[in-house]
Image (cartoon, rainbow, N blue to C red):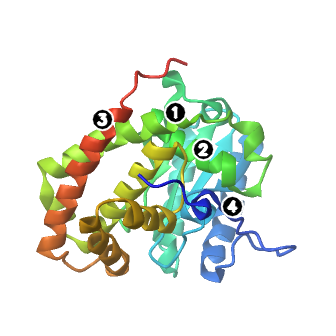
Amino acid sequence: MKSQDNCCGSSYNLFMNNAPYPTPYPDVNVVLLELLPAVQSILGSHFIGMYLDGSLATGDFDEASDIDFVVVTDKEISGALFESLQAMHDRIGIMDSPWAIQLEGSYISQQALRRYDPAYALHPNIERGSNERLKMELHDHTWDVHRYVLRESGITLIGPSPQTLIDPVAPDDLRRAMFAALQEWAMQILDEPTQIDGWGYQTYSVLSLCRILYTLQYGTIVSKPCAARWAQETLEKTWEPLIERAWVGRHNPGLKAPADDVTATLDLIRYTLEYSQKFKMPANKR
């Protein structure tokens, strides 16, 4: 494979100099400025900080993205606190904004955030979507990808620097996380290909596979554009049109994916699974 493209190793901070808003996207800020004080009010003294990760942090945010966030607390969230947070998310979900149902985030204790510990792996989580609610979700070692992005390029809404809260995530930890996620997620699609009949999930799958391949090769995380561009320049040319069309399709998630692209995506999954075998490593003991 070709050497790493320098641009793929970069990211940018979405904070504008001396601006009162966390991102350059006014409609996104409306939702965030509703969410942050509500979270602080509910958690009170248990609140440590709130951060943005995902595409907002890695530099590939657009109108087809979601709003990835992490709230750090001083203890595990359960009981009445969980119920209050759940009710708050229900209320935000019916705001008059398309971004209100694009929140995707977790509430994780400071102890659990620092490094993966299977004893502290169940945390409140909400996914994007009109029918989603806050729920308790397993955050296994694949969540090291979020730790890395948050530590290296996360956006602080309020709280201490993420680098003071998270131990460094090693390249092999990222490879293990991607390998494990690929084995579970990709095999499910191969077992049930109808999952990618819609253009939204089909194109998401293609771009995710580009990112997985990049991380396996270099042990780091880059934005979707960087990973896709690298894949187009590095992989066999047969994949180039599929990856190019993924950028068109991701902006039309409600449409049916072209049958040829579904077939090609399944082939790309098989290619990635085969390629990943040379990066299979023993589980990291922590």
CA gap, disc 1 and disc 4: 31 Å
Mark 4–mark 2 distance (CA, rounded to whole Å): 23 Å
The residue beneath circle 2 is 148
Give residue 163's position: percent from left, percent from top: 74, 42
Could you say which quadrant of the image residue 177 lies in?
A: top left
- Dot 3 and dot 2 residues touching (CB under 8 Å): no
Question: Of the residues shown, which amino acid type is indicated by label 4?
Answer: Leu
Marked residue nearer the N-terminal end (3 or 2): 2
The mark total stands at: 4
What's the residue at 73%, 38% (across, down)?
165
What residue is at 52 percent from the left and 47 percent from the top?
Answer: 83
Q: Amino acid at mark 3?
A: Gln
Residue matched to label 4: 36
Dot placed on the residue nearer the N-terminal end, 4 or 2: 4
The numbered mark at residue 173 is: 1
Label 3: how many residues lie within 10 Å, few (<14), some (14-19) or many (20+)?
A: few
- The foreground one among 108 and 149 is 149
Residue 138 visible at all: no
